[in-house]
Image: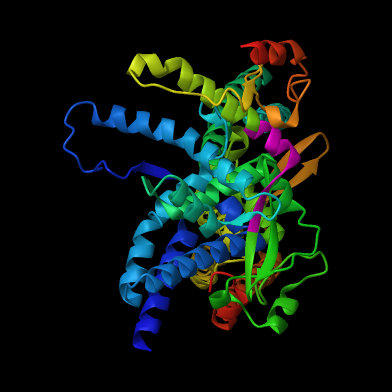
Amino acid sequence: MNDEKYEKNIIKEFLKEVELKLPIWLKSDPQELANVLKELEEHIEDKIEALTEAGKSQIEATHLTISEMGSPSKIAREYKRRGTPKLYITEELWPSYLMIIKYGLLAIILINIIIMIVSAITAGLTGLNWGTAILRGLVNLFYGSLLGCVIITAIFVWLSYEGYFPEDFRKLIKKKESVQIKPRSSIQPPKSKIEKLETEKGQHYPKGVEKRSDLIAGGIFTLIVAIFAIAQPFSELNALINTEFLKLLQVIAIFWLISALFELVHSGFVSWSYNANRALYPARAIISLASVSILALFLIRPEIFPIFWWNESSFALMSIAPQYYWIYYLILSLIILGIIIGAIHKFYRAVKLEEAEFFEA
Amino acid sequence: MIKRVKEFSDTALITQKREFLENFESDVLRGISKLTVLSVINGSGLEGSYGYQILKSLNELTSGMLVIEDGTLYPLLNRLQRDDLITSSKKEIAGRNRTYYTMTECGKKVFNLMQGFFTKLIEAIAPLFDITISLKTKQYIYCPNCKNRLDLKENPSFCEMCGLNIEDLKRRLLYE
């Protein structure tokens, strides 16, 4: 009996290790992942059965079978090796790469043109001439394009290494067909629970977790805001704003940046990894709570908060009049309260997660 | 999938160009693995074969000469399936629900060409390594255009891969 338990543990450990190392495109499809693991498990069982029939002890047969399976890393690497190499990006991903580069550059150019126009308009406020503002814009355009190309290329090299194909993204986005889950016996959640996981769109989310699309959208939005707040690209405008406010903004933006990165990482694990969800929800809650300290500094310094308004033909800048401080206190207190409630909710989600609802459990 | 030939040790003390040699062996074995797995699945006919059975057959057919890393068979099957050379279906036999792999129509044709290419390649390079290859010329002919292997029992008039008329070739072979 003990032998049987020991044997099951070895197999379970091996399969867990394989699962851990499999590429994300495979893990993001619960049905395919369950099929892969089930096939490996069946193979192991068949071989152990054959070896025990040939006279080996149960433990010997288990050890021999596992050793002949090949290392989990090698199995996972074989799943990743599925594209046709073309430079460092696979041929399959090449058209998507060119398309993203094209639209990425277009977006960078558009953003820079908008920044240039705003800089040119606000140039008058600081005494800078239009020419200097546009020249700075062109330099930003060059560096922005360069950085964009490098980041997109690095992402596609990584995707190629992971063995992604364009259809994997389509599958991730759509997943229209209702998935019939048949995980391996040891990981099969109770039937009623599988039914609970099914949403209207046929996508599977364990109870109590956010949707992947929400996390990605939220993460990207926060990331863009954070980059703007850290870079503070409108130098002419910055000259008018209290430097203490700008510095505090940069500090809080670092928290936003970390929070955005965590959200994006979380989006990759949200539907299938119990352990990742257990770790990421509290981590995100702690980051939110940490940002409250900076908001508290904003709260005690209402005089540094800038307000823009349109004065006849240009933007003007002013501070909040003391008689309206109470509005400032109220809004900021509500924001802080919202962040604290959000953080508590994240802790609550982490505590309430049920292992059986995740496919890796 | 195929790691090495069993009679050779992978811990042999090779001090010169070890990495080059390992890469060379790995490249050759990758192609051969595809061919051998397709060969076993093709041999299993309409009934198909499941993972463990494929490796078991391969082991028997090669007289246990190969060291195979069992787990890496499945990524290979996954790739062959994606390339539409094989197809899989779930079957419950003797109380066990298994995934059976069978050749697709396209897979059968491609496999014929693959084995034709491989056979003719081995025949062509055999003299370089001082080995002798004897092809079953009474049983198969090889399309001179695309190297496809054609079974004479089926009395083909055209190569099913490239459409070449092979009547003349057949007649010549009969006279020989």
Q: Is residue A42 left or right of residue A53?
A: right
From the top left corner, tell me how far across and down residue A178 is, in percent. Answer: 79, 64
Which residue is painted at 36% across and 45% down in the image? B65
Quadrant of the drawing holding the C terminus of chain B: top right
Residue A128 place in picture, x, y as percent: 62, 24
> Image height check: is A104 above or below A219?
above
Who's the residue at 43% across and 44% down the image?
Answer: B62
Q: Residue at x 32, y 75 (%)?
A: A59
User: Residue drawn at (66%, 63%), measured in percent from left and top?
Assistant: A31
When asked about the image quadrant of residue B70, the answer is: bottom left
- Please tell me which residue lies in front, A339 or A65: A65
Q: Tell me: residue A294, above or below residue A3.
A: above
Let me know if residue A254 appears in the view.
no
Residue furthest front in the image: B175
Residue B94 appears in the picture as rendered? yes
Asked if A353 appears above or below A244 in the picture, the reply is: below
Stretch in magenta: B100-111
Q: Is residue A177 left or right of residue B79?
A: right
Question: Residue B27: x percent and y percent?
Answer: 42, 31
- Horizontal side of A287 relative to B108 (left or right) equals left
Scheme of image coloration: rainbow
Judge whether residue B157 is colored magenta: no
- Count how many numbered circles sit on residues in the image: 0
Depth order, front residue of A352/A293: A352
Residue in the foreground of this view, choosing between A191 and B15: B15
Question: The N terminus of chain B is located in which quarter?
Answer: top left
- Look at the image and say whether residue B109 sits in the magenta stretch: yes
Check the image and report above or below for A134 versus A94. above
Tell me residue A95's x, y (percent).
68, 29
Q: Residue furthest bottom?
A: A1
Q: Nearer the viewer, residue A29 or B151?
A: B151
